[in-house]
Image: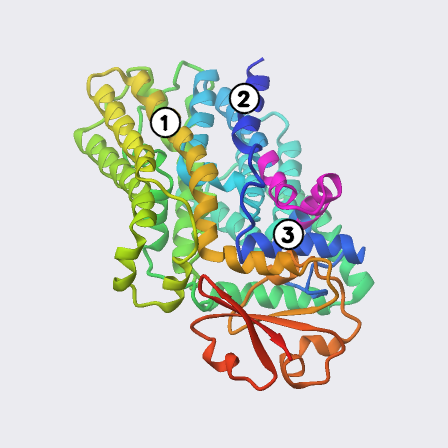
Amino acid sequence: MKYLLIALVAALLFIPFLGAVHLFDWDEINFAEAAREMIVSHNYSQVQIDFRPFWEKPPLFIWMQAGSMLLFGVNDFAARFPNAIIGIATLLTLFTIGKKLADEKLGMWWALVYAGSWLPHFYFKSGIIDPTFNYFIFLAIYFAYRIAHSAQSYRMAMLSGFFLGLAVLTKGPVAILVALLVLLVYWLWNKFRISIKLAHLGLITLFAAITTLLWFGYEIIAHGWWFVNEFVTYQIRLLTTEDAGHGGPFLYHWIVLLVGCFPASIFLFSYIRGRKRSIYGRPPASEQKDFKVWMWILFWVVLVLFSIVKTKIVHYSSLCYFPLSYLAAYQVYKLAAGRLRLRSWDIVLLCVIGIILGIAIAVLPLAGVYKDMLIPYIGDKFAVGNLQAQVSWSVAETGYGIAYIILVIVSAVLLTRKKTTNGLICLFVSTILILQVTVVHFVPKIERYSQGAAIDFFISLQGKDVYVKALGYHSYAQHYYTREQPHANKNYYDTNWLLNGTIDKPAYFICRITDAEAFIHHPNLEVIGEKNGFVFLKRK
């Protein structure tokens, strides 16, 4: 019954309003466009963008999106639906593991902590690849941990290898890198003693290889080594070089996890090693302690690895959400049972971050209402153009942020007065509620500023036999929202030909206002519109 309840609540949290806002450039539109092109081209073995090989990602998540689009049609809801299903599966998995480690209470707390934290919840409403990848790699690590604590250790090794293979098919060899680093650190931590034998490692390797070869093997046999070689080369470059516009300091992901995983992050930092005993006498203390060790190692491996990696993107550290939420849930579990008390600085930190988030939510409508007062202080011409978008705001909407601040303070007061369970439920449930408000009410308005005019332009060209190109910046939106079909004339890929050559059908262009000077005076282009920081042009 509780499994059904969790599944129902998760479905209500993650599925409604998935299509309420357009997909965001780059990642969301990138993957959705790859899925759409699979359907159009009937080429399901190679990922494509603009109907050319796209070797940055393997195909598993794209297959999931393509299946969703075949079911629901090519739309934004279908692109995000797979992650909503993964969200339901994730909460059910957390409940199951928590129940096995202790009891149903730990399982329920873990599911609530995960769903009641900002970024872990928000990502299940997105169309990016990471929630699915994280789920598979976490299961691979979990079943590796189970090898030492199960009578069916070889079966656990097979499952670990299977999910590791799925993780590789979802995001690439970074899954193997993470798994190997976790295993190596665990081996060192235990002073070179480990229950995973060579036979287990062999099974993990075998089943991971069998799973990944379902695609890599077929691709090599069908098309040779070129595509796979480009794929591996790209993965290496991603880890060793900084992508333009995606750099950041070493502590970037530390700050992301502290603020983005609120309130779970507060309880992680309050973590204190418990005594060497089981929670209620079952299962053996060594199993609980061992799982905590695996979670700590997974957390630090991912955090340090992606702090070192040159490219800094918010979701690169999202695999940390699993160990972070477990360690936080374990603290919450002990707090609710009266076996632990929060220290004063924990509650202060909870209030500070909660109030900062509440202020950000409250200030957002004010920035919209009084944007004319802010514009003179903004030096970026494109940002000023974005703010010209006609978006309806009211001062009353600050009430959402103020309400969240009040609920965070109420939670802190309840925790201080030792009404712990009530305080914890108030904190996580209020975060879930404000998340729904943010996703349904605020995100569509933010999207109107950031890309709304561009998306409208592309949608206006849907179904027309034309060329559409972004000039001066990189975008996938022109492919997805124009529902672009393959072009017979391959000169299309040459921007110079589109601008100066003898074209065989109308060509439309878009650029940002900051780059417009180079194009508005081009002898072959005429400006057909300008809106919210974007300039629209047509080949004469």
Query: Which residue lies under the disc numbered 1?
Result: 430
Report the residue marked by disc 3. Answer: 32
Residue type pointed to by label 1: Ser
Judged by depth in the image, the label closer to the viewer, 2 or 3, is: 3
**Image point (70%, 50%), residue name:** 212
Q: Position of residue 94 (x, y in %)?
A: 51, 28
For residue 259: magenta?
A: no
Mark 2 vs mark 3, CA separation in Å = 28 Å
Q: Residue at x 33, y 61 (%)?
A: 249
Q: Quadrant of the N terminus?
A: top right
Circle 3 residues within 10 Å: few <14, some 14–19, many ≥20: many
Residue 89 vs 246, above or below: the answer is: above
Q: Where are the magenta residues, as a range?
A: 62-85
Say which amino acid is labelled 2: Ile
What SS does tag 3 mark?
helix
Q: Quadrant of residue 73?
A: top right
**Callouts 1 and 3 close, C-beta under 8 Å:** no
Residue at the spot 33% in from the left edge and 22% down from the top edge: 426
Q: Which mark is residue 540?
A: none
Does the image show residue 149? no
Q: Nearer the viewer, residue 261 or 13?
A: 13
Q: Name which of mark 2 and mark 3 comes first in the sequence.
A: 2
